[in-house]
Image (tube, rainbow, N blue to C red):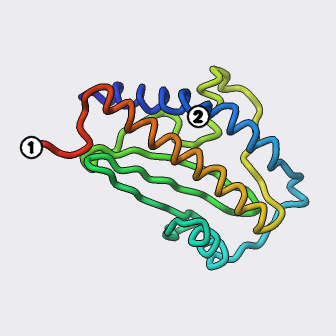
Amino acid sequence: MENIFFEDLYYKSFSNIDFTNKYKKLMDNHKHSLDDILKRMDKSTIRKIFKDIGYDFKISSPGQFYVFYETIGNYSFKVSFQITGGIVIIYIYIYINHEYIKVANNNLTFLYRYLLNDMNLVTNQPTFINYEELKTILINILNIYEDFKKEFLKLLKEENLPEENTQ
């Protein structure tokens, strides 16, 4: 199966879950002056927030990347958060049979622009001023991820592509 097929399913899945409206609301609700955002963060506190909401994210170095993998049959999903200086940058990746499916817009802010067909649109990454707000952002993004994952797997099933390796 061609990569372009899976790339199309990636974008269609996000479109079908009303991603643009959900992400716009997230950006609008979590937009702060850079003077006001939380500058210094504790990795163990952030990992505890992930655990409290039901996810076991690993810290990936260098940098402030928090990564979660989930595998369902032949399909693996990777959610990566770059959380630094009060700013949250989110990426969602797909692997099929351990092979990365390259899409142009893994970063959700760029994906938002792409789906609106306006790559020049001025947008912001979600920002936070305290850990409670960070938790709210993470819950919202992980809900989007769960909706995306369900939709992606549903579209695969509609295309008669098995979740499990049948070889």
Q: Quadrant of the C terminus?
A: top left
Estimate how packed mark 2 is, as few (under 14), some (14 to 19) or many (20 or more) residues with alpha carbons within 10 Å. Answer: many
Q: Residue at x 21, y 46 (%)?
A: 164
- 106 and 11: which one is in front? 11
Helix, strand or loop at mark 2: helix
Does residue 42 appear left or right of residue 128 in this picture? left
Where does label 1 land, which residue? Answer: 167
At label 2, the amino acid type is Leu
Per the image, label 1 sits on a secondary structure element best described as loop
Determine the residue positioned at 82% across, 46% down: 29
Residue 45 image position (x, y, % from top left): 67, 77
Q: Earlier in the sequence, mark 2 or mark 1?
A: 2
Q: Taking 91 as reference, is 163 left or right?
A: left
Question: How far separated are the C-alphas under marks 2 and 1?
Answer: 34 Å
Label placed on residue 111: 2
Q: In the picture, which quadrant includes the N terminus? A: top left
Q: Is residue 135 above or below residue 73?
A: below
Badge 1 crowding class, 10 Å Cα cut-off, few under 14, some 14 to 19, many 20 or more, is few
